[in-house]
Amino acid sequence: MKLTRRNFIAAVVGGIAGIQATPLPWKITDDVAIWTQNWPWVPVPPTGEFTEVSSVCNLCPGGCGIAVKKVDERAVKIEGRTDYPVNPGGICPVGMGGLQLLYDESLRFTGPMKRAGLRGAGEFTEISWGEAFDILAGRISNLRKKGTPEAIAAVDGNPEGTTVSVLIKRLMKAMGSPNYVRPLSITDTYRMGNLLMQGTLAPMAYDLENSDYVLSFGCGLLEGWGAPGRVMNAWGMWHDGNPAKRKTRIVQVESRASNTASKADMWVAPKPGTDGALALGLAHVIIKSGQYDSRFVADHSSGFDDWRSLEGTNHIGFKTLVLEKYSPEQVAKITGVNPKTIVSLAKGFANAKAPVAIYGKGKDSLNGSLYEFMAVQSLNALKGSINRSGGVLLPDPIPLSNLPPLEVDAIASEGLKRPRLDQAGTMRYPFTDSLINNFTDAINRNPKSPVDTLLVFSANPFFTLPDGGGFKNALEKVPFIVSFSPYRDETANMADLILPDCTYLEKIDDIVWPTGLQYPLYGLSKPVVEPLYNTRNTGDVVIELSRAIGESVGSGFPWENFEEALQARAKGLFDAGGGLVSYDPDAPAWQRQKAGNGPKPGYKSFDEMWEGIQSGGMWYRPVSSPKSWQGLFNTPSGKFEFCSKLIAQAIEHYSNKISKKAALKNMGLAAIDDEACMAHYQAPKAGADRSVYPLLMLPYEMINLASGWIPSPPFLYKTIFENQLLKDKSFAAINPKTAAKYHLEEGELVVVKSPAGEVEVRINLFEGAMPGIVYLPLGFGHTAYDEFLKGKGVNPNNIVQAGQDPISGYPVWWNTPVKLVKV
Amino acid sequence: MKDPVNSSKKTSDKGGDRPLSGFFPRWMNINILAQDVGFFILGLIGASIVGWVIFPAVLYSKHPQPINFNHALHLDSEKVDGIEGETKAEKCLFCHAFRDDGTFVGIPKLESCTECHDDPESPLGETPEEKAFMTKYVANEEEIPWLVYSKQPDCVYFSHIAHVKMGNIDCATCHGDFADNEKLPLYVKNRLTGYSMNIWGKRISGFYWNKKFSDRMKMDDCARCHTEKGQEQNNACFVCHK
Amino acid sequence: MKKGNDHGKNKYGMVIDIDKCTGCGTCMVACAAENNVSVRADQSDKERTITWMNLYKISNGKEFPHTEVSYFPRPCMHCDHHPPCVSVCVSTATKLDFNTGIVSQIYTRCIGCRYCQAACPYGARYFNWWDVFPQDKGMDRYLTPEVSPRMRGVVEKCTFCHHRRMRAKTLAYAEDRREIEEGEYVTACTEACPAQAITFGDLNNPEHEVSKLIKHPFTFRLLERIGTEPKVYYHSTRDWIRKLGDNFLPGEYTPVVNQTWAEEEWSTKPGRDEF
Amino acid sequence: MDSPLLPHGVKRCSTWAFFFWTLPWVALLAWGGLSAFLCLWKGLNQTNMSNIFAFALWIVFDLAIIALGAGAFFTGFLTYVMGQKELKNIIKPAVIIGFICYSGAMAMLGIDIGQPIRGWFIFWHANIHSMLVEVSFCITCYLMVLAIEFIPIILENRKLEEIKELRIFGHNLHEIMAVFAATGTFLSFFHQGSLGGMFGVMYARPFAAREGFYIWPWTFFLFILSAIACGPCFTILCTKLTEFFTRKKLVPDSAIQLLAKISAWLLSLYVVLKIADYLGWMYGIIPRSGLTFESFFREGPYGVYLIVLEMILCGILPAIILMLPKARQNQGWLIIACLLNCTGIVLNRFLFIVVTLAIPVMPFDRFWGYLPTWQEWGIGMAVVGYGFLLFSAAYRYLPIFPQERELNPITE
């Protein structure tokens, strides 16, 4: 039989009909749909045992408690701890996104590396740890052999007092280099101010939770100042319950309608850099109306009234200074704040039961001005808000043990005699520890870099320093750079050698006294997961490096590993007694416990205590009853000094060397005599021709964007508004009036030009911006990392033209003259 | 090109003389029609073979488990000591346990095995499987890559504790009785979807008379039981989906 | 749709205190981290970025220095009775759960027609325009198995972290309890908010904090007038914020008068001294 | 070359001429093909649609061509059910246009959904409350009906007609066409209505929301009415376009005039009801939501002018022209009126889709703009290309204008 076409068609029809009666078409339709539901490229997170590890966040000096949720070996979520004194339950968005910093491989160095490409290109080849140590130790030994150990320098971004920073400092000393510098933060300003006015070395302790009137001078309470988990929790507490019966009022002094300013009960907007004048204006009103705490002023302060020295010279006191120079009208002229507002503000502060004036500049990651701090602190003194609940507390420094004294060899002791490149601690900057801007200048000024080998720890000065790109230029000149960063940051990309640290979730590390906290707290973070890559805790690396260098350097580090060094320091916590290692949310650490009534430490030996610290992640001493006034102030007068004797001595000391006029000029002082020793307002020098640069640029910080050396977790970019960042352009916020003056519209591209450089941004018209000021967000403009962060927006630090703050020498980064040029 | 019209014309002409020609229209030749039917049936049969036999064979792949596990042996209290439990379910739960937070362990990790099989040098029995298990997994501390017959897709949330403990449903109801099982069956996987055959059902037709729960674990099966039991956890989507 | 779920067992809801909200965005990050929400290199493309919990920045529009900004954190409103998105869904991929009041979204059922997005006035629904995860960066290592990652081409949205309810129930079962207590099940944003601005609980249970808070005169909902009946409530003492919660014709908005407030003169805040 | 396939007794251009004529349309199809590939392979990120513009160009296209394609069912209804024999002269092109519109719309929808492979869930897991489900069911069924209606037309091809079986099959189908026409009418009424209902039921979008009768918002009825008002006009336009390109008279004026007249009445009725609808909406739904009519048009490119255009220029004006016998008998005016009518309906669909979505409902939300990408245009244009190709081929190979031979006797 021949198969005709007709037969064939019949068979096909039969086949088509038949196939409908089989599962084939139906199951394929179903299965293909199921296939789309289980596409192989959509990840299926493996399940397993759910556990939780308690640790401490180490992304900022705030040190909030975190609970990391794990599934088997993977960390899947970070949450705030409710059993941690700093932050009962909440953390900031950066900490919340922390797992991305752990797991985003392209952000990180996966092992020790050697530079392969050009500097800044970020091309590296992997090497072994042994090789890395050989290279670095060899180089250091060479410099030491040549007798130039001071050509080794270190930039250390670890917060002051942490064990790793102590070890790094010790290593520098053992090697024989005085050139240990650190990026500045607000705590440096606090430290200096406290030293000068109160003679204390303990950190700033603002008892915010117990205050009923928080007058914040520029403190970005909601922008990430201090421990964000703590401050925002306090914020929630302040707004708890019936809104009509709220106890605490918050006033924000700031030029921009930031979150803090908007959410505060009252917002006062002085011109940037005039906060000190405003504080003195308030002091004027308070003194004039006699509403100040006369008992505190009389018993525990000096320099308030005019006085006569033993030699018979007349001196003016704080009272006279303020009454003469800072009447509301005078202050209004400086600050632009309505005199009526000044008076009402002063009244609010004066009438409060437990007011506190706090000082800051946005987050805590940039320095402030010494005299501004002194002005604000003088307000606290006027109202007796010092050593009083709800005011500024004066706790003892945290009782960590000192490490055994270091014996340095001849090379090192010679090296240590050489002057510091940054001139910190010289007569010119008598109270300053470290001045990174001067350090940068010293490298840039010399034709040949005085630094041969630069070690960078936990810092990204290339990106974070408000120096108009100075550090970047310096890096280009330094022959050999070593980065210890776990992240591929801008500075690390310039490095020749990478000895990567573990991220904060992979290592043990300590947090010493979170910024602004009113009680001593020692936090301990622990490895939440095993290190993912071939990275090592810098604490261990420093110890190992010292051994690799050998000689007396190695013998200065007798510890087996970093943990032993941590324990060696923590001994002091045990010896001091009374510290707690567990936290009960029902007894907040800021609640004043009656002596003997508070929770008791449950440990009996150091090992027990250490075990407690390791599992709970903390050692702390809750706020106790006010301290005895006896010996509280360690100033020359033994009292709170409105007029700092130390400053007077320093000026006199310097004047003995050069003329007084030259001395004052070098120290950056316009005022003379007593005024120079007291809080006063000094207009910052105009760094440029203001007719060419008619506007001011002010960098501002946001809590939902990391602006320090830690990269922002990519999740954070979800929280950035499209009028802050759009594609690769960040926005400058300016007042619509300013915009109208320059005929600028929303979204328009402009170049912000300062004498130090220029950046291209878009315009955001914001009513809450002070007219005449261009606000640029900090944290954008990375040139390193991966596609999530790289090339997004601009970094305002690159155009900052910083002057020097009188006496401290700190950069005045809030006074950059700029102009706007349409693109 | 050959003209189809002409050929059909020819056939229709021939057909005119056949019996029954008056009944069918002229162009419908009964002979041709019979031929048509024949080829139609041929196609039908061919398609059925493709659809019912070849297709399933191609669609599914079969995988043996990495090593055998003898459930019967382990549950035999005369031979193996220590696996306790009053009921069958309790015995299952001895290894396939709930954690403290109520989550289900599923197939136990190696550490459960090594509670007894702790020394790779001295096996407890004499089977070659155990030897292989000892040398390959226990000695290297390597987890056994079990293939899970009842693994649901990622979109499914299933709480064992809600069903077994709170709902008093026996393990065997859904999983079948593994207590007497000596040899682990082959794992049959759908190449297209990646599903285990135990999920979609062992019958390619998808039809069952008197279906048991252990036959299939599709959404409809879950929903049916939920509806029948009329629980407060009704058939809301988020009860079973994540 | 039947008006049935008043008789449902639980009706979960949320009250967000705008005065406490600091606009920090932790809720957004917590939500994204908890729910395996995708991240892409450019997230300034707000029309296509996925943010189950989204912050809207609002301003009182006054001139410097009387300007004030605030934020509306906006999860899915889990509209009651007749959510605008549920009835329009073609493939029954989204439903209002009778027993929890949660509007569910099943990604494997969704065909991606996006009708629900068109119907939702809150913009709470997000389409997966891209395949989820950046490949080969190791970022899938932080994904939690409790929430199924989405494929491209489907709509997703806030689920009130219903998996946390399952987690709480599983724990309760392990402890021989059938019911879960207040606070055992809260959403990730509630838990994460560092200012404790979010309260979450069962609106059907008069003992729960949320049930008390929603009775407060300062409490309001977004777009109440169009009848979506959201189960997310907001709370603010500031009139200008409350006024922005809905559309009002001139003269329609009546401020909440509170005598105690009126007596306090010390604050210069606009909105505050108006009542 | 293809002369054996051409209908008897009519003149057609040369094969080469036809080949070149198809090139631009093939190019459009290729553009669309590339776009479709990209959208299916890489996903809808190839478009500029967004979470705000969840519906965009494609849906506008879909709704527009489905409305314009209404000529098919409505002419069929008039011809077979109402017995307007005059319209037999135009029913075939109407059916083909309908088929093009509906199949094009279906293809676009297939690409528009995020998970095309799961498209059948609409039927399998149907949510009967959803207007879109009703639309999908009816459109799918109606597309089948259109296909069945199209078959006898195809079978009229000279070559195919030579096959006896097919000829008889085609004839038999033709006999029962009234049944299909009635079915098509029923299905079309529902999906045209449901397409309107889709928007009217979005009660949380005050710009689109409408009250209505039982479960059907007013837009349900208005969409039906507007579709049958513009469908015939589109059929007229297509015929006129064919006449223009072929330089022949293809349809007797009586048929065209009848369609135009019917369209006129329907359009007038629609305009009146639509104005009533607008008023009811402006004084009902909008103020109840706390909004004003102007508040919808405060910013962005979508201003009140759109409504003015829709109602006056593209509504009242064509209605008047078509109403006046003198005007509609003038070729120019007729074409202008038909164009305006069709534009008005497309504008109406655009307003309901794009403008609805562009206007924020929350007072603090912002207004969004949208511009389609080339991929989106590509797919839209591919439907145009497909339409031209299919209609040209149909005209060339099928006797779709029964009067063509009489109106254009071949004089050689």
Image (cartoon, helix red, strand yellow):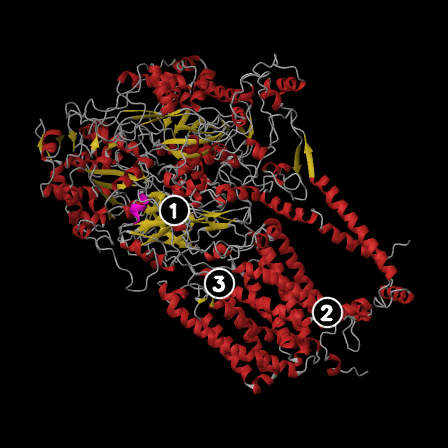
Secondary structure of residue under mark 1: loop
| Horizontal relation, residue C246 to residue C259: left or right | right
Q: Which chain carries label 3?
A: D
Secondary structure of residue under mark 2: helix
Amino acid type at image mark 2: Leu
Q: Which of A568 and A748 is in front in this view?
A: A568
Secondary structure of residue under mark 3: helix
Q: Find the distance from the CA under tag 2 to the CA under tag 3.
A: 37 Å
Amino acid type at image mark 1: Lys
Q: Does the stretch in magenta take in C212?
A: yes
- Indicate the quadrant where residue A174 lies: top left
Q: Please identify the quadrant where the N terminus of chain B is shown.
A: bottom right
Residue A8 visible in rendering: yes
Residue topped by disc 1? C11
Q: Nearer the viewer, residue A630 or B79?
A: B79
Q: How many marks?
A: 3
Residue topped by disc 2? D173
- Indicate the quadrant where residue A299 lies: top left
